[in-house]
Image: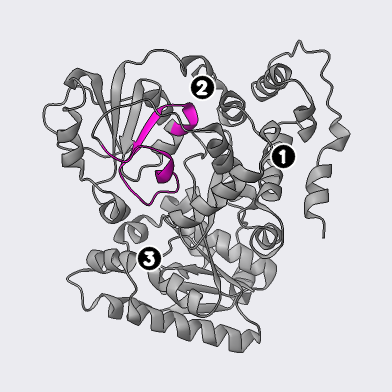
Amino acid sequence: MIVPILFSLDDYSFADKVNLRPFYSFLYFCYQNNYPVIAQEEYLELPENYLQNEKMNYIFTEESKKQWNFDVLTKDQFNSIKKYIITDKMSKALCKEYENKSKAHLDILKKTNEKFKDILIKEFNQIEKDYKKKIDAVLVWVSNPSIINVCNEKNIKVIQMEMSPIREPSYKETLGYCCLNSKYDIETVKKQYAIFKEKINKDDLLSRDEILSLFLKECDKNILNKRNKSKEYDLGIALSMPEDYFYSIYATMTHEDIIEKAVDLTEEERISYRFHPGMKYNIGNKANIDNSPSSKEWIMKCNSIVSGVSNVCFEAMLFGNNVITLSDEMPWSFMCQNHLSYLDSNVVELEFINFMIFFYFVPFELLFNKKYLKDRFFSNKSIIDIYKYNRDFILEKKGLTNEIFNEKFINRKKLIISKCFQENSDIESIKIEETKKGNLLKRIFRK
């Protein structure tokens, strides 16, 4: 049995209901599989109430429902799901010993909270009693040490989900985090990558240009030609949201220290600053504040990208830039520079890019798929099996199959680019049998 949990004390999440879409994905997952859900009382309004709220309409558009793998539940369907509620009273009790709700939220993200542990243990025990089944795993959108601690004690897997840096509308596809415990569990990533690097056949890897072609939109195709050209700036500094709780926990330098240190590395006019979308910062008289329409365009202007916990660091890795991640806990931290002592060229190896794109991250369509989750976390499928499955799933969406790996690299690259950008291919010698589409996937994951 897999049980989703949605819990957060973040005021921002409640004010703008940013977690409603993952919550409805969780709910629909529960409805389809007859599973219970654990959630805070604030989220348990009937869908029809949100449908009548114009500010919430964006959650229920056809595009949103398709991307997030849910449909709007009727009142009867909604009521058929067994809900184990973290009441408003329980949430308020967790905040009592803190100065305010934000400090409670930050503390629970950082360390185990015994009161929250007690709530979870009671809910887990009640679910197992009611269903007469053991909980095998919990799905979480925001993980924390209390959830991980309780689940370790009860031999339950924690599967954290979240949108990855590769997401629509910036890219053609959306990938999601789908990892054990927390996306900040870097030791697990290190172990998985070591296995991947040892076992992977180099012929099963895609080049950066091939991967970018699979995900870039038509309007961004010029990035393929810009990647290796000289840059306008030596250093690009990505500034996170001022109230970013994860930055305060996991980053090793403050924004102020980064800005101060950066001018020791290169001339001021060779540094570019980019704010988090919709945010403004007082960083003094800095002329080079970037206003590019997308992070991709900004990355193309800079030799090196620096940030604490920003997803833009992985995007820069994918494009082949030097990356400085000022955190020891991001999934890619161990593969890049983690200090501002000097600037150097350090392009992350292609094996790691393939590992992240096609194993660590997951096509969003599969994120709430029960069979996929069981195959990924509860079967004897290897890391290479999962890698190939995810990779071929993306290829098939572009009308390609894994038979492209039988082609010479130069022909394969041309074919992928032509397919992804809808060009007229002049490669008459390459013929892919479309009737074979899906065969590998069925072989790997057949029951």
The earlier-in-sequence mark between 1 and 3 is 3
User: What is the x, y in percent for residue 274?
Assistant: 29, 31
Instruction: Provide the residue span drawn in magenta.
Output: 317-339
> Is residue 245 left or right of 100 when viewed as pictured?
right
| Residue at disc 3, secondary structure | loop
Which kind of residue does numbered mark 1 sit on? Asp
Residue 440 position (above or below residue 178): above
- The residue sitting at 21% across, 22% down in the picture is 266
Residue projecting furthest to the bottom: 129
Please give the name of the residue rendered at 20% of the width and 73% of the height, measured from the top-left corner.
98
Which residue bears the numbered disc 1?
Answer: 392
Q: CA distance from mark 2 to mark 3?
A: 36 Å
Circles 2 and 3: CB distance less than 8 Å?
no
Cα gap from disc 2 to disc 1, whole angstroms: 23 Å
Which amino acid lies under the numbered mark 2 shown in the image of this protein? Asp
Please tell me whether residue 280 is drawn above or below residue 194 in the rendered image: above
Image mark for residue 12: none
Q: Quadrant of residue 89?
A: bottom left
Judge the density around disc 1: few (<14), some (14-19), many (≥20) Cα neighbours within 10 Å.
many
Tell me how far mark 1 sits from mark 3, CA to CA: 35 Å
Question: Depth check: 64 or 248 in front?
Answer: 248
Per the image, the residue denoted by label 3 is 8
Question: Residue at position x 40%, y 21% from top?
Answer: 300
Number of numbered callouts drawn = 3
Residue 334 within the magenta-colored segment of the rendering: yes
SS assignment at label 2: helix
